[in-house]
Amino acid sequence: MTAQRVQAIRVQGLEKSYKELQVLRGVDFEVARGSIFALLGSNGAGKTTVVRILSTLLKADAGSANVDGFDVATQPANVRESISLTGQFAAVDEILSGRENLVLVARLRHLKGPGKIADDLLERFSLTEAGARKVSTYSGGMRRRLDIAMSLIGNPPVIFLDEPTTGLDPQARIEVWQAVRELAHRGTTVLLTTQYLDEAEQLADRIAILHQGRIIVNGTLTELKQLLPAAKVEYVEKQPTLEDVFLALVGSDGKDGDASSDAASTRMSKEHR
């Protein structure tokens, strides 16, 4: 099997600037099919810009990107047929019921049996009992689950979740996490952008940290924790958290971690040779 078929997303040398502001400065990463990949970074790091380029909403200045085997720049129509994008805020019609929202999207996509599609998704996301209610009565977690359900109509192999739990309370976040895990369990490839470190810890198979327009580290949670030495407190070994790794790499203010990030990245690359 070729690397292109194994990898659902391949990004090489991606660059993007807005006049004098260089947002992306050579971004490289790959996402395996059926996995959850977390793109972690502070506000303004360029996470949403990457997602917009991969979803054909924005053109890169340089570099290449492939999604589901299609080139983002030369085959945008094929890419759009292969993906779904869920933004930072739920895009649902509050006047309609949950079921009516799903049926509407299925009809817009000219799919057969929109009612059954809606009912199946309501059951899958534990919304059957609330399906007949107006979305205006839904909690934040229910709205976000409905939003993700709407994104899955048509069974896209790749889904982008751009900070899906922004503004949600802890219980609602857990509900969304369960929905995301279910996506990967069923074989959907998920690219998740987030600034919540615990979210990446809970969900991601691999985590990349985007800082000042570049990927400064990319690995599993275990690999990232190994970048920092374990601390010993009263003879009990304490493993570093993802938050420790993140702050050591980018600095507490997003500017002071360059030296440590270079050292950590060098250490990681040596360990994987």
Image (cartoon, rainbow, N blue to C red):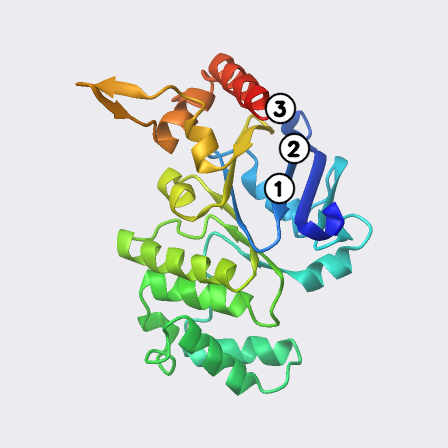
Quarter location, residue 81: bottom right
Horizontal side, residue 130 vs residue 251: left or right: left
Q: Is residue 134 in view from this perspective?
A: yes
N-term mark: 1 or 2: 2
Label 1 element class: helix
**Residue drawn 82% across and 50% down?**
74
Q: Give percent across and percent down for residue 219.
A: 53, 34
Nearer the observer, 231 or 149: 231
In this rendering, which labeled residue sits more in front, label 1 or label 2?
Answer: 2
N-term mark: 1 or 3: 1
**Residue drawn 37% across and 74% down?**
127
Q: Give percent across and percent down for residue 77.
A: 76, 60
Label 2 element class: strand
Pointers 1 and 2 in contact (C-beta within 8 Å): yes
Quarter location, residue 15: top right
Q: Give percent across and percent down for residue 85.
A: 57, 57
The correct choice, above or below, for 115 with respect to 39 in the image is below
**Residue drawn 33% across and 21% down?**
230
**Residue drawn 31% across and 65% down?**
139
Spatial CA distance of label 1 from label 2 is: 9 Å
Nearer the observer, 85 or 22: 85
Q: Quadrant of the C terminus?
A: top right
Horizontal side, residue 178 vs residue 5: left or right: left
Residue that mark 3 sits on? 273
- The residue carrying pointer 3 sits among few (fewer than 14), some (14 to 19) or many (20 or more) residues within 10 Å by Cα, namely few
Label 3 element class: loop
The kind of residue tagged 2 is Val
Residue that mark 1 sits on? 50
N-term mark: 3 or 2: 2
Q: Which mark is residue 79?
A: none
Residue that mark 2 sits on? 27
